[in-house]
Amino acid sequence: MKLDSKIPAGKLSDKWQQFKSEVPLVAPNNKRRIDVIVVGTGLAGASAAATLGELGYNVKAFTFHDSPRRAHSIAAQGGINAAKNYQNDGDSVYRLFYDTIKGGDYRSREANVHRLAEVSTQIIDQCVAQGVPFAREYGGLLENRSFGGVQVSRTFYAKGQTGQQLLIGAYQALSRQISLGTVTMYNRHEMVDLVVIDGKARGIIARNLLTGKLERFGAHCVVLGTGGYGNVFYLSTNAMGSNVSAAWRTVRRGALMANPCFTQIHPTCIPQSGEYQSKLTLMSESLRNDGRVWVPKKIEDAKAIQQGKKTALDIAEEDRDYYLERRYPAFGNLVPRDVASRAAKVECDKGLGVSPTGLAVFLDFSAAIERYGKSEAHSKGMENVSKEQIMAMGTKVVEAKYGNLFEMYEKISGENPYKFPMKIYPAVHYTMGGLWVDYNLETNIPGLFATGEANFSDHGANRLGASALMQGLADGYFVLPYTIGTFLSKEIRTPKVDTNSPEFAAVEAEAKKRIDGLINVKGSQSVESFHRRLGKIMWDYCGMSRSAEGLLKGRQMIRSLREEFYKDVFVPGTSDEFNPELEKAYRVADFMELGELMMLDALNRNESCGGHFREEYQTPEGEALRDDANYTYVAAWEWDDQEPILHKEELVYEEVELKTRSYK
Amino acid sequence: MKLTLKIWRQKNNKSQGKFETYQVEANEHMSFLEMMDVLNEQLIAEKKEPVAFEHDCREGICGTCSMDINGRPHGPMQGTTTCQVHMRVFKDGDTITIEPFRSTVFPVIKDLVVDRAALDRIIQAGGYISVNTGQAVDGNAIPIEKDEAMKAFDAAACIGCGACVSACPNGSAMLFTSAKVSHLGILPQGKVESSRRVLNMVAQMDKEGFGMCSNIGACSAECPKEISLDNIARLNREYFKASLASEKA
Ligand SMILES: Cc1cc2nc3c(=O)[nH]c(=O)nc-3n(C[C@H](O)[C@H](O)[C@H](O)COP(=O)(O)OP(=O)(O)OC[C@H]3O[C@@H](n4cnc5c(N)ncnc54)[C@H](O)[C@@H]3O)c2cc1C
Ligand code: SF4
Ligand code: FES
């Protein structure tokens, strides 16, 4: 299969403008006759559905949640990037483009990333107009902060709840279209399969989660904004319901899965505390602006801390190893996520971890508290201030900046992070891989589009902080509504799709068989227990570091787990009722197939880049060793039960010179 | 720690529900929902139907989790959602009563799961600013005073969980509705259509069958995001002004 990325000709900085002025349009009277299905109403889906509705298309939107406002996007904390250069610190569209390409370790498409940087500024305008209450300066203008891997302040935020506020903005825009009748909203409806007719995506089968009934929906095209697949690891910072099934079902119908092994492990999460744990909680990257990461230098100290005989406060300054500052003096604690996560693992593997499980490092605010305290004392003209007073004043400053995060930490861990350093450990957070799409965000199945975290397009092998929200909204508000015209302008004569066709009947029957099959296994082990085991295999063999040997073993283990699942899973209840256990069961079944593909993809990529670290490919200092000569391509996989097939899209860099990423 | 749970079980919205009693072994590091997971694993091992409850983010932001715990929506702690409650707040040997959010406008779907779609319909009635994609001016073209922006933010922090309705003896949705009326009404972008907004949202609230507000304040006391009663006062002012204006027109 030849993968055509459909990147427009012309200079990089002109491509998008040029494209927009040449893309075929659909006349308003025709739009009304065209049906578009949007699956997923997180940032990427809700923004797309609302905008397509505004344009006059007849939209049907689907979510498995009880309301679009619950989507996983709601949990994003830190912020959203945009090349506004409001701070006048030298930011520009080009710089945002460049940082994203470099941050992605040179494994993303130049043209897509440049377009993302271009439309980033419009997103902020749109969100402000919708009433998103971004943080502001005293002068009433918008405020910014910095994130890892960059040297400008371009992140817009709304306290630690940026995702919530952006999603509510998109949800309100969507609600407006629902009330105007341009969008029909199907809550608690889960897409369980895709219907392809004459090679084009023409509809979906959705399960009404309240009744269990399978329902047919036809349209001229289908858009997925169904999120990422981090929950394949069981424990992740994703919401419990996030799953890969919508995307995976399209893979089973011929769509390609691109770079599935590119997963992001976020360095600062609250460590796992027990076997019963259901999910992990992120501590925003913004904390690394002020927190210093360290472990004890001596193994005896680490042991004593692990056994509860010592605390961080018992370790003298000279016995602490601030390893990020030591290894990466230029970026220090603000190195990108992949680098910070791996470094934490290295220390814990040496036995220097600081929690009972040995899997945690300290994130320490005492130096920041002291520094802020001194600066407060100085600005107030105070002299001869005691250390206690300084620390008390500094604590106030830190509280004002990160209060809600500290509170969240204390609620979960039961420890006061102003007194004792936080304990943190990396956790699965985001998936750069996803459905392969071309410049138009269209998959290799004509008429099937993918937006947001569900596609693979913009972040290469590692995503920079505050860029996922940007991408989701760019795709939904500003990119897809244009690019979808390339397909729909040729469909104006296509009549309404008839859901009584044999194609719909066949897909529905297959879905029913698959779902009923799970209930009928009537085995003895819970779905949850299988998911947990799958997650452990993924984490052990396809997590922060990978090796050929481990990946081969992991793949075998998943295969046998899958076999066991279909022989011994127990799903209570029936398929024609509200049944959350059954929902979990068919999602976990798909995760198992995806997991296997991830192992295969990681095995194929004989290099280390971004979030993908292969033990065999590292420098003597333990840094990632990329292989540009052989792996500057997108690995797009066609599923096959026995042996998935690899298709390559070569990445061509016209603007940027490929360099070794250095943060030293 | 050993706990006794009295949980509301109800097969669907047509059947009658009743309390069932269960014993469960938990530890204090678990979250409340992880304790419920343990119970469900236990039930599944016995080939019994697990207890249906809703949850998603488990971080207090999506508004999916509900449950009345010992008679209080979202349990015993101030400013906390059910998913953020940790077992530390309970003692070995405690009996905990768990029910769905109670409101005639939130029909029970199964066990602890209720249907809160009425809240979406209130937003659809006017909880937005009418601006299409691409129509916006530059983000810094409308300066907004920091304190005003913060006030709008505080109202916008509502997670749409419906605890306020469940807490209210009248079953009123005033706190929820007023949070949106304030969020958008405080901002200059949203002021333009504030009269229409408040009239339509209140009308929808009534149509859904939510009760009247008689200023009891239980809503705000139980709200996990501590949405302030000031918002209700603000809604009342806006509503009064808007009704006068529409009478004149
Ligand atoms: C804790 C946390 C913090 C984060 N913080 C930031 C941040 O500060 N900045 C940043 O840029 N990024 C952040 N991210 C990443 C970012 O939040 C996500 O990548 C982004 O929100 C994904 O948006 P989405 O619209 O693609 O998908 P989602 O928000 O996951 O939405 C998926 C939608 O699809 C629906 N769906 C899925 N499958 C089906 C199906 N089969 N049928 C019907 N509907 C379906 C769901 O119901 C939902 O509506 C964070 C992520 C996490 C986990
Ligand atoms: S006002 Fe509070 S209690 Fe009511 S829905 Fe909003 S967050 Fe929940
Ligand atoms: S599960 Fe999201 S708020 Fe509780």
Image (cartoon, coloured by chain):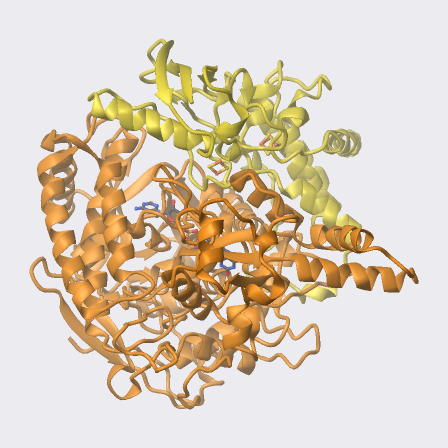
- Taking A354 as reference, is A629 above or below it? below
**Which residue shows up at 19% across the image and 70% down it?**
A548
Compare residues B140 and A425 and report the one nearer the observer.
A425
Residue A334 in the image: state x and y as whole percent: 55, 70
Residue A559 in the image: state x and y as whole percent: 12, 52
Q: Chain A appears in which tint?
A: orange
**Which residue shows up at 33% across the image and 18% down it?**
B12
Compare residues B87 and A43 and report the one nearer the observer.
B87
Q: Is residue A127 visible?
A: yes
- Taking A416 as reference, is A398 above or below it? below
* Image quadrant where residue A107 sits: bottom left
- Taking A477 as reference, is B209 above or below it? above
Q: Is residue A136 visible?
A: no
Q: Quadrant of ligand 2?
A: top right
Relative side of A431 to A199, left or right: right
| Quadrant that contains the N terminus of chain A | bottom left
* Image quadrant where residue B30 sits: top left
Chain letter for yellow, please.
B
Relative side of A200 to A521, left or right: right
**Which residue shows up at 29% across the image and 67% down it?**
A490
**Which residue shows up at 22% across the image and 68% down it?**
A601
Residue A320 in the image: state x and y as whole percent: 55, 64
Residue A407 in the image: state x and y as whole percent: 61, 43
| Total marks in image | 0
